[in-house]
Image: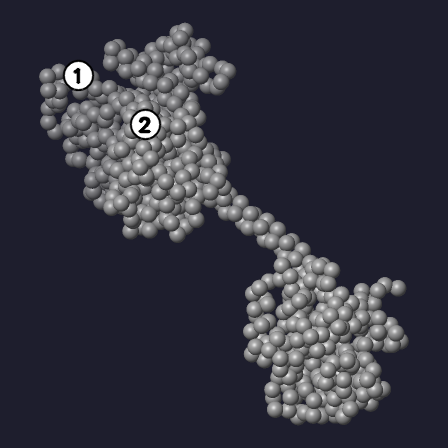
């Protein structure tokens, strides 16, 4: 059989006990503490013990009224102890609500001076459901087992004389002696402070003393010591006993050794502390990861290096610091740019001024060397310690001391972090905190170190991108031809790169002006859309320009000559298409020659059979309405000669509104660079009336993934049919409809795009002499 204490599992807890003082001779309750009065409210003392039990509604575990059973408290009237009895109370009190299980103990105060005729009755709460079941089970067993059970609870009872200022003990029970080792004669006559020792909490003792001096009860737990010097945790419930006049005559103490519970509580608290520390550490780790992720996202979402730095500072102040500054250096360590921010927007300008002041005081060794000296970070927990030290590092903080511009920043601790690139440190981050914020720690430094490594690489990539972009723009601007300005020809040319990271590609256009006032136009598309395609395009343009301007050939002959030149060894090499393979790049090209108009009689459109071939459309009612597209009474005609090397046909909008693609079969030829083709190329010639608009383009304008080329050409016809009159608005409309800026690249394609629109005007004056020194 397990011990009675284990079976009983009675937990006293911090709930106060209900204490009665019973006059055994009279069989009356002569005193009840506050909790006992709550159990039997409205009763006046003295009162027969049976009457008080009925007023409290006490019942046995079976639910029978206690007064109708063999009353266990009646044994007190025979000066017999009640070692333990399970009861329930029906009244709501501090001990519980409704019918709360209680454990009642009755102890005659035999041997107490002047109190031999009295007994203590104490009601204790049973807090655990299992304990309640154990109490009920034990209550049904023989008295011997119950005696063992109550002794096993370790409940000690003491009575102190409140009329004596020293509050000496006048009575203790046997359990007190068993628990403390002090016998009856050793304890009686002494203040119970003899149980205290070196580990007893003085504040808890002081609270007990104040309660007793005020004549009030108290519940507390003290570290006491046995006669042998062993420490134990003693839970003490002290209740004042009042006489008929309401004066405190005694203090009754109910004590129990709760060392096991205290140690269990301590172990629980230690476990909770460990869990809480682990939770805080996990939360801090999560916060650090969130900060790193957000900083990476902020930096990666920008293409402008300065804006990326500014956004990072807005994140770090206030997330990690009160003041955040970043200095960008050149290869010598000199600061070439700086930015600063404060968590208080009103102080951001001050922070910027302070950063500028620091920049001016950088020593000759450079900012990176003076602040970090090769270390990845530097932590200054107390910036005040740097003032006046003469260290190179001190200039970072000294400008903020005294009445300087940085005094209002109140930088109490600082953290300097390198933002390394692949080979060098070009950016340095400086974080500072005000005195009311915890100083930077090594954990903060490690977080900053991780942040610095990520940020440094991203910023270096942005610098490389900006450098590549500048080179690409320079290359592109050098390869794109200037649009000619002629009084009888209006031109609008646009280039849209498909490879956004390079801003260049293989599409090209070129204009060739001859001294007879005719003009050549070349539009082409070199295979690929990257910087390598742009290099190949530059070679091809050079061949076109040299051929067209030197030999004065018509389009078909120019294409044949260029194609022959491309077949020569090394003419288009090396152009690398991948890491392991070199090959000449193919190119589609449309070359046309335009001769200015000469006055001639009007020719009905229906007689130009060649214009009626191919896909056509209508420009709604412009000619019929007599608008800008109407054919003049005296019509001037431009002569257009073209030849195509696998390129898309041009689209012409005639003054009467007719739309047609100029795509004669005999003028089609293979791509440039195919090689081994002995077929001759051919020209096609058209007479276009003044007022016509000619649209040249590359496939990036109309091609869509998953569509046929015919679908793209039909879409182009429909878009041009709704285009406005003015040439600038014409091109804007076409680009807006076919390549809107908000369309994802997966829909608009990744190919480069060239669009050239030419409005063929009627020449009303003699053309300028292009051989004159002033040009046109």
Residue 386 picture quarter: top left
Side (left or right) of 558 relative to 292: left
Side (left or right) of 571 relative to 59: left
Q: In the image, residue 399 lies at what x, y percent? A: 28, 40
Location of mark 2 (residue): 366
Name which residue lies at 37% across and 34% down.
Answer: 428
Side (left or right) of 608 relative to 224: left
Location of mark 1 (residue): 515
> Do the CB atoms of the residues marked 1 and 2 lie less than 8 Å apart?
no
Q: Where is the N terminus found, in terms of image quarters?
A: bottom right
In this orientation, which residue lies closer to the viewer: 488 or 389? 389
How many badges with numbers are in the image?
2
For the question of whether residue 465 can be seen, the reply is: no
Instruction: Give the answer, above or below, for where 258 lies relative to 324.
Output: below
Q: What whole-number distance in Å separates the C-alpha atoms at marks 1 and 2?
A: 60 Å
In this orientation, which residue lies closer to the viewer: 291 or 304? 291
Side (left or right) of 68 relative to 600: right
For the question of whether residue 184 can be seen, the reply is: yes
């Amino acid at each position: 059989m397990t011990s009675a204490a284990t079976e009983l599992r009675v937990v006293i807890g911090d709930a106060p006990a209900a204490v009665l003082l019973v006059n055994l001779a009279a069989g009356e309750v002569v005193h009840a503490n506050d909790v006992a009065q709550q159990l039997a409210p409205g009763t006046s003392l003295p009162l027969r013990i049976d009457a008080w039990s009925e007023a409290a509604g006490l019942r046995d575990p079976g639910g029978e009224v206690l007064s109708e059973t063999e009353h266990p408290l009646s044994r007190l009237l025979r000066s017999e102890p009640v070692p333990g009895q399970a009861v329930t109370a029906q009244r709501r009190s501090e001990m519980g609500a409704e019918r709360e299980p209680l454990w009642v103990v009755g102890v005659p105060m035999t041997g107490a001076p002047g109190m031999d005729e009295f007994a203590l009755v104490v009601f204790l709460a049973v807090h655990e459901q299992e304990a309640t079941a154990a109490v009920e089970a034990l209550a049904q067993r023989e008295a011997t087992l119950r005696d063992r059970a109550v002794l096993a609870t370790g409940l000690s009872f003491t009575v102190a004389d409140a009329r004596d200022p020293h509050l000496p003990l006048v009575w203790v029970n046997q359990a007190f002696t068993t628990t403390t080792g002090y016998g009856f004669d050793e304890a009686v006559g002494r203040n119970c402070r003899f149980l205290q020792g070196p580990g007893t909490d003085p504040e808890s003792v002081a609270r007990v003393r104040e309660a007793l001096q005020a004549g009030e009860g108290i519940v507390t737990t003290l570290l006491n010591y046995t006669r042998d010097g062993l420490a134990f945790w003693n839970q003490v419930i002290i209740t004042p006993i009042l006489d008929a006049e309401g004066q405190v005559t005694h203090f009754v103490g109910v004590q129990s050794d709760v060392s096991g519970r205290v140690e269990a509580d301590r172990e629980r608290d230690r476990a909770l502390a460990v869990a809480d520390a682990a939770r805080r550490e996990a939360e801090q780790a999560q916060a650090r990861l969130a900060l790193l992720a957000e900083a990476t996202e902020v930096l990666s979402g920008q293409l402008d290096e300065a804006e990326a730095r500014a956004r990072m500072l807005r994140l770090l102040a206030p997330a990690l610091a009160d003041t955040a500054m970043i200095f960008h250096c050149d290869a010598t360590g000199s600061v070439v740019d700086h930015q600063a921010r404060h968590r208080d927007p009103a102080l951001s300008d001050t922070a910027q001024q302070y950063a500028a002041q620091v920049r001016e005081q950088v020593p000759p060794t450079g900012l990176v060397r003076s602040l970090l000296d090769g270390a990845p970070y530097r932590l200054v927990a107390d910036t005040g310690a740097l003032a006046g030290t003469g260290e190179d590092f001190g200039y970072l903080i000294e400008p903020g001391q005294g009445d300087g511009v940085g005094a209002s920043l109140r930088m109490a601790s600082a953290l300097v972090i390198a933002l390394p690139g692949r080979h060098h440190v070009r950016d340095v981050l400086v974080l500072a905190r005000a005195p009311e914020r915890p100083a930077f720690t090594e954990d903060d430094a490690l977080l900053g170190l991780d942040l610095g490594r990520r940020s440094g690489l991203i910023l270096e990539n942005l610098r490389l991108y900006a450098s590549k972009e500048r080179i690409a723009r320079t290359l592109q601007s050098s390869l794109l031809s200037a649009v000619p300005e002629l009084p009888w020809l209006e031109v609008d040319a646009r280039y849209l790169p498909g490879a956004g990271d390079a801003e260049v590609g293989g599409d090209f256009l070129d204009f060739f002006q001859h001294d007879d006032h005719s003009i050549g136009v070349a539009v082409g598309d070199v295979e690929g859309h990257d910087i390598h395609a742009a290099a190949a395009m530059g070679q091809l343009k050079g061949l076109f320009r040299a051929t067209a301007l030197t030999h004065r050939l018509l389009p078909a002959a120019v294409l044949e000559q260029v194609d022959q030149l491309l077949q020569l060894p090394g003419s288009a090499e090396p152009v690398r298409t991948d890491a392991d393979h070199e090959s000449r790049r193919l190119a589609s090209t449309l070359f046309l020659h335009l001769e200015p108009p000469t006055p001639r009689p009007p020719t009905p459109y229906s007689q130009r059979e060649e214009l009626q071939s191919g896909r056509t459309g209508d420009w709604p009612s412009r000619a019929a309405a007599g608008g800008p597209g109407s054919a003049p009474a005296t019509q001037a005609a431009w002569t257009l000669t073209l030849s195509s090397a696998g390129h898309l046909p041009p689209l012409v909008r005639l003054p009467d509104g007719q739309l047609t693609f100029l795509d004669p079969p005999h003028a089609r030829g293979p791509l440039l660079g195919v090689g081994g083709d002995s077929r001759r190329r051919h020209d096609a010639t058209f007479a276009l009336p003044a007022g016509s608009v000619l649209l040249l383009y590359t496939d990036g304008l109309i091609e869509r993934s998953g569509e046929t080329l015919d679908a793209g050409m039909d879409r182009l016809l429909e878009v041009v049919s709704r285009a406005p009159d003015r040439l600038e608005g014409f091109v804007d409309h076409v680009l807006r409809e076919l390549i809107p800026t908000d369309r994802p690249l997966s829909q608009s394609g990744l190919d480069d795009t060239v669009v050239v629109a030419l409005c063929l005007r009627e020449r009303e004056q003699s053309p300028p002499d292009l051989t004159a020194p002033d040009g046109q």
